[in-house]
């Protein structure tokens, strides 16, 4: 008879790693199924490969990328070093309406996108969890900050988040490792923001899952810069660097790569899942695995795709609906004069952060919700030379030194949940494993565009306050998906008639199926979501283990 | 983390140089593969064209107290980029511009650009740069004229070469620390 696992976790990325760690540490025999290949840090991490050893010197093989990664190439991190961490778009197709592009940026390998993620880590607050209820938007979150606060503590103790405590209600402080420092130009802007917008705006260093001190066997950052290519010293958090080794250490983990999960096996009579159906990525053979618990941590849209293929979890009709991303790319840049005698040394893998200040503390705006700014300052390098007149020995000498200090505010805003932003199965377009793929129908609305416009204004205001010159406000036109904060489509809620998951991330239709990746989100806030995914996953896994212990599952 | 911007900013200071002390064998193996694949790539430039590109590049970034663009292999880099990365229209413009340099050189001095003395080379390049600046001044969105193309290829090829990174920029692959306000010149300067 086939083995019955205590738990199956689908996906080995940032949430799958946490589910594996929490379940195995509570004694559950856990099988982690990963669709992609194993990653060996010693062979696959390439962060120290010098630029001159790359054929295109970092400019990328555009012919190859156009042929095999026409979507993935839109991501800054899909570079000549790290493109191996992004999927082949021909093997992994999806469709959109012609007038609604959506960029679905994916990694399929052990570690998932936690290998290439941006590492910015911010708590959400009740400004976020209470927003839908306050404004009558979508449905209410079934949890509040108090439910998640101990789980933020729990994951932060393990992950290691560097940052500065500010005591802001809209952006609760994490348990911080020492902050990375702001550079000279950033300090100038920070002081100007504090002076001109007291009590409203504050600029701080980004809160990042990058170690500023050795932490739980992982080394402090050595400031080489390109984290998305891997980190041989494990200085940034990823499942591969931290949670999966912890799960492995319990002796309860089995990790099976090359295992494409097709669907969750569902016993309609009992209203329970019994396991999952896997297609072996290499042999294309189908195989079933049995388990008492299933955690879907396959990434927002992959988890929903699996549920859509499973034929349950959609009594509410909300499965696949309310897809969100963030909206990014409003802001301003300018030149900061002075500080000519100073420059930075080392590549700080982090920038500045301006926490949300719109619709906070009772101040109202013409739009709902808000946005935060990331960005930072740095001196121009040799690339400024192309548009500087001249050539020859003097020109070469001038380019040897640094150029002016440039500073950028770059906004990330909240996207409202709307039922018409949705995904559905597209039976006509199977992937390389014969599995139906998604049709994604999603667009930004007026509220998001209003946020983008406001970002350009307030970004320019702050640069003006800092005495910057040549200030350029900007509003980019990025399709949704490119922020790579896609969330929703299997939302949590208080009512089985209007949501897919309950307050513990269990499917209303199958209490032994938990969805704890971005699919579960009921609204999007404006903060980077991964830290919240981790806290939600750890909380749900602890709850699941408790239910098993009490024999309720 | 904030993505494209931070990357842009990260790109504004020193990036890669000296090999990691961690796994030199691995890095050399990867480097060897990259070099082999570069050699396998088709060659677009004839020997004559390559010489003209190398000669132009050397006047833009000449040998001084550090090696210049010729030693850094800028012509070979430009060949790869023009052949495999330029759009067809960009490539045609570049090749036509290259032919024009030698044609003007022949007409004025009866020799290919690469055979001229440095003063004559510089004089011709100054004319080309002036024309390029005028085209861009009239229309900032106009496609890059030849001189701007070859200048960009030279700077990119030089500063990302091993010579450019290690001897000119003193870039450090593993800085080991972040100094937010270092005195200029006291630490290795940055990349672009």
Image (cartoon, grey):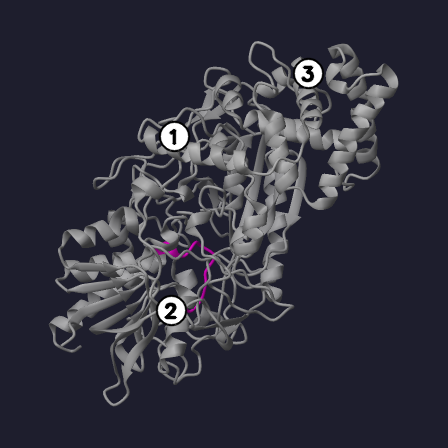
Decide if residue A248 is in sight here: yes
Quadrant placement of the N terminus of chain A = bottom left
Task: Relative to A193, say whether B16 is above or below.
Answer: above
Tag nearer the camera, 3 or 2: 3
Quadrant placement of the C terminus of chain A = bottom left
- The 10 Å Cα crowd at callout 2, few under 14, some 14 to 19, many 20 or more, is many
Q: Which residue is mark 2?
A: A303
Relative horizontal placement of residue B28, taking residue A190 as reference (left or right): left
As measured in the structure, the alpha-carbon distance from the residue carrying label 3 to the one carrying label 2 is 58 Å
Relative horizontal placement of residue A488, taking residue A534 as reference (left or right): right
Image quadrant assignment for residue B89: top right
Query: Considering only order in the chain, which callout, 2 or 3, is on the residue closer to the N terminus?
Result: 2
Decide if residue A336 is in sight here: no
Q: Does the stretch in magenta take in A112?
A: no
Mark 3 in CB contact with mark 2 (< 8 angstroms): no
Give the SS element for disc 3. loop
Residue B166 in percent (x, y) is at 48, 20
Q: Does the stretch in magenta take in A529?
A: yes
Tag nearer the camera, 1 or 3: 1
Residue A343 in percent (x, y) is at 50, 24
- The 10 Å Cα crowd at callout 1, few under 14, some 14 to 19, many 20 or more, is some
Magenta segment: A522-531
Residue B190 in percent (x, y) is at 52, 25
As measured in the structure, the alpha-carbon distance from the residue carrying label 1 to the one carrying label 3 is 33 Å
Q: Which mark is residue B28?
A: 1
Residue A486 in percent (x, y) is at 46, 62
Give me the chain letter of mark 2.
A
Q: Which mark is residue A392?
A: 3
């Amino acid at each position: 008879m086939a083995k019955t696992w205590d738990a199956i976790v689908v996906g080995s990325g940032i949430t799958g790693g946490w589910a594996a760690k929490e379940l195995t540490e509570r004694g559950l025999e856990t099988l982690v199924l990963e669709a992609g290949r194993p990653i060996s840090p010693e062979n696959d991490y390439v962060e120290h490969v010098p630029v001159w050893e790359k054929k295109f010197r970092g400019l990328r093989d555009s012919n190859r990328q156009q042929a095999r990664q026409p979507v993935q190439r839109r991501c800054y991190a899909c570079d000549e070093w790290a493109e191996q961490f992004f999927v082949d778009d021909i093997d992994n197709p999806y469709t959109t309406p012609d007038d609604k592009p959506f960029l679905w940026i994916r990694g399929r390998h052990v570690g998932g996108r936690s290998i290439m993620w941006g590492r910015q880590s911010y708590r959400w607050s009740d400004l976020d969890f209470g927003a839908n209820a306050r404004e009558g938007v979508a449905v209410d979150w079934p949890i509040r900050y108090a439910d998640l606060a101990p789980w933020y503590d729990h994951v932060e103790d393990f992950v290691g988040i560097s940052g500065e405590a500010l005591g802001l209600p809209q952006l609760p402080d994490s348990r911080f490792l020492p902050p990375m420092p702001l550079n000279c130009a950033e300090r100038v802007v920070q002081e100007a923001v504090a002076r001109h917008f007291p009590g409203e705006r504050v600029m701080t260093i980004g809160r990042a899952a990058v170690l500023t001190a050795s932490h739980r066997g992982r080394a402090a950052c050595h400031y080489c810069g390109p984290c998305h290519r891997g980190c041989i010293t494990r200085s940034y958090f990823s499942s591969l660097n931290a949670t999966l080794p912890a799960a492995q250490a319990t002796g309860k983990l089995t990790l099976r790569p090359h295992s494409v999960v097709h669907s969750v096996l569902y016993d309609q009579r009992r209203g329970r899942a019994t396991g999952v159906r896997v297609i072996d990525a290499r042999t294309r053979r189908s195989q079933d695995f049995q388990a008492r618990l299933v955690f879907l941590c396959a990434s927002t849209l992959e988890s929903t795709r699996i549920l859509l293929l499973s034929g349950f979890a959609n009594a509410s009709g909300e499965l696949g609906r309310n897809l969100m991303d963030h909206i990014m790319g409003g802001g301003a840049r300018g030149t900061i004069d002075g500080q000519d005698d100073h420059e930075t040394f080392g590549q700080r893998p982090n920038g500045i952060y301006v926490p949300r200040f719109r619709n906070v503390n009772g101040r109202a705006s013409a739009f709902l919700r808000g946005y935060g700014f990331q960005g930072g300052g740095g001196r121009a390098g040799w690339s400024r030379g192309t548009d500087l007149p001249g050539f020859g020995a003097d020109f070469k000498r001038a380019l040897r030194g640094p150029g002016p200090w440039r500073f950028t505010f770059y906004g990330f805003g909240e996207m409202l949940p709307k039922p018409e932003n949705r995904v559905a199965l597209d039976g006509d377009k199977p992937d390389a494993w014969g599995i139906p793929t998604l049709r994604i129908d999603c667009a930004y609305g007026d509220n998001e565009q209003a946020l983008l416009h406001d970002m350009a204004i307030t970004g320019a205001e702050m640069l003006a306050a800092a005495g910057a010159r040549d200030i350029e406000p900007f509003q980019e036109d990025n399709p949704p998906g490119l922020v790579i904060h896609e969330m929703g489509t299997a939302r949590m809620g208080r009512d089985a008639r209007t949501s897919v998951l309950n307050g513990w991330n269990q499917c209303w239709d199958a209490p032994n199926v938990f969805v704890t990746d971005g699919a579960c989100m009921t609204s999007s806030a404006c903060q980077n979501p991964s830290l919240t995914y981790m806290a939600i996953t750890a909380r749900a896994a602890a709850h699941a283990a408790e239910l098993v212990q009490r024999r309720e599952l | 983390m904030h993505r494209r911007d931070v990357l842009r900013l990260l790109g504004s200071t020193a990036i890669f140089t000296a090999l990691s002390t961690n796994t030199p064998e691995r890095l050399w193996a990867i480097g060897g593969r990259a070099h082999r694949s570069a050699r396998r790539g088709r060659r677009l430039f004839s020997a004559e064209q390559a010489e003209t590109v190398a000669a132009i590049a050397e006047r833009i970034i000449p040998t001084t107290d550090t090696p210049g663009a010729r030693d850094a292999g800028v012509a070979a880099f430009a060949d790869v980029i023009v052949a495999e990365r330029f759009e067809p229209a960009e490539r045609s413009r570049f090749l036509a511009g290259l032919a024009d340099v030698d044609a003007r050189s022949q007409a004025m001095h009866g020799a290919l650009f690469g055979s001229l003395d440095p003063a004559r080379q510089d004089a011709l390049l100054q004319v080309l740069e002036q024309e390029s600046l005028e085209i861009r001044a009239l229309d900032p969105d106009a496609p890059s004229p030849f001189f701007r193309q070859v200048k960009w290829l030279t700077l990119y090829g030089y500063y990302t070469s091993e010579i450019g990174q290690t001897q000119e920029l003193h870039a450090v692959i593993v800085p080991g620390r972040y100094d937010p306000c270092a005195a200029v010149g006291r630490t290795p300067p940055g990349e672009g």
